[in-house]
Image (spheres, helix red, strand yellow):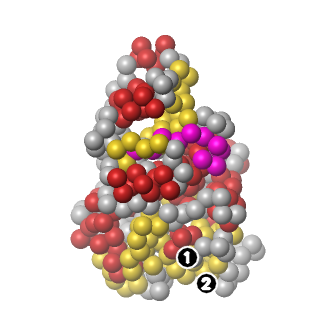
Amino acid sequence: MKAILFDHHGDPDVLRYTDVPEPEPRAGEVLVRVRACALNHLDLWVRGGLPGVSIPLPHIPGSDIAGVIEKIGAGVTNVKPGQKVVLAPGVTCGKCAACLAGRDNYCPQFTNLGYMIDGGCAEFVRCPEVNCFPYPENLSFEEAAAVPLVFQTAWHMLLTRAQLQPAESVLVLGAGSGVGSAAIQIAKFLGCRVIATAGNDAKLARAKELGADETINHHTQKIKDEVRSLTAKRGVDVVFEHVGTATWEDSVASLTRGGRLVTCGATTGFDAKIDLRFLFSRQLSILGSYMGNKSEFATVLKLVAAGELKPVLDRTFPLAGCRLAHEYLESGAQFGKVVLKVD
Ligand SMILES: [Zn+2]
């Protein structure tokens, strides 16, 4: 089969479009013919290499996959060849206390397709049967592939970790990112007031189209000052963080009393500091969040199928153009998802 492969970490030019053996599904697994695979910041980290993480090489990246079941392994009963599926990105042991409690993103063996195991930047991908979810028929393959990681992550952050309540106020950083565009929609679905940030006017206009009530240009305006003025000095209940060092101080300062900051990433750097006086006196919560569980994924898929949440597609590239797609994603020019189309 054709696949995108890299055998060492580095810049986008380590990605090779090449022939590799087609995987064979083992017991409890399926082989999926990939029709579309969305990219995430995770793909950039995986390709570049992460300190302390040893990714088996050579490696096929790609976590967000929509396609058609090609073959099933022994004992597979829930799906059959020819069936369209969208895949839950998280692969876990299925047996530990966390998995049995439905908290599979707390599984010690948690990984994503395309992270510690081969992913979907290929004509075929092998995955556990339990990762196959019902296909939202209102979506194209490219749109369906744009759903899993970002909507599941944003849902876990806002609902499960930050316990977002209807009509609260939320500051969503980086509206142009995949998670940002998902978070705006989820918060609006709950009837919340959404203040969104982005780096240019075109992205701010798109954020409003997605439902943001107010927007802040984080290049020309100071986030904490704008939040203060937009909320009559009160601050917001929840800050949706994934930017890291560049925005951290403003994010913490934008919280109201009892506010919760939830973060799933740090694209501008991992260093952050916090003034403990504000943490305790304002009774703030700082919450880490990692991916999401299969139950949350099922919920977001239902809302997507019902048209309540919509994947935001920026641009598609052919599988062979994966290197260009990585460069484009790295440039930060996109609004929404960058997706590889596999023919
Ligand atoms: Zn487990």
* Mark carried by residue 315: none
- Asked whether residue 50 appears in the rendered view, the answer is no
Q: Which residue is mark 2?
A: 70
Residue 218 coordinates in the image, percent (x, y): 33, 42
Q: Nearer the viewer, residue 221 or 161?
A: 221
Q: Is residue 296 left or right of residue 221?
A: right
Find residue 225 and report its image quarter: top left
Quadrant where the N terminus is found in the figure: bottom left
* Residue 192 is covered by the magenta coloring: yes
* Mark carried by residue 141: 1
| Residue kind at label 2, given as amino acid type | Glu
Asked whether the residues under the numbered discs 1 and 2 touch, taking CB atoms below 8 Å apart as contact, a structural biologist would say: no
The residue positioned 40% from the left and 51% from the top of the image is 204
Q: Secondary structure at mark 2?
A: strand
Mark 1 crowd level (few <14, some 14–19, many ≥20, 10 Å Cα): many
The residue positioned 66% from the left and 70% from the top of the image is 136
Farthest residue in the right direction?
Answer: 77
Q: Is residue 306 left or right of residue 62?
A: right
Which residues are the magenta region? 188-197
| Residue kind at label 1, given as amino acid type | Phe
Number of on-image labels:
2
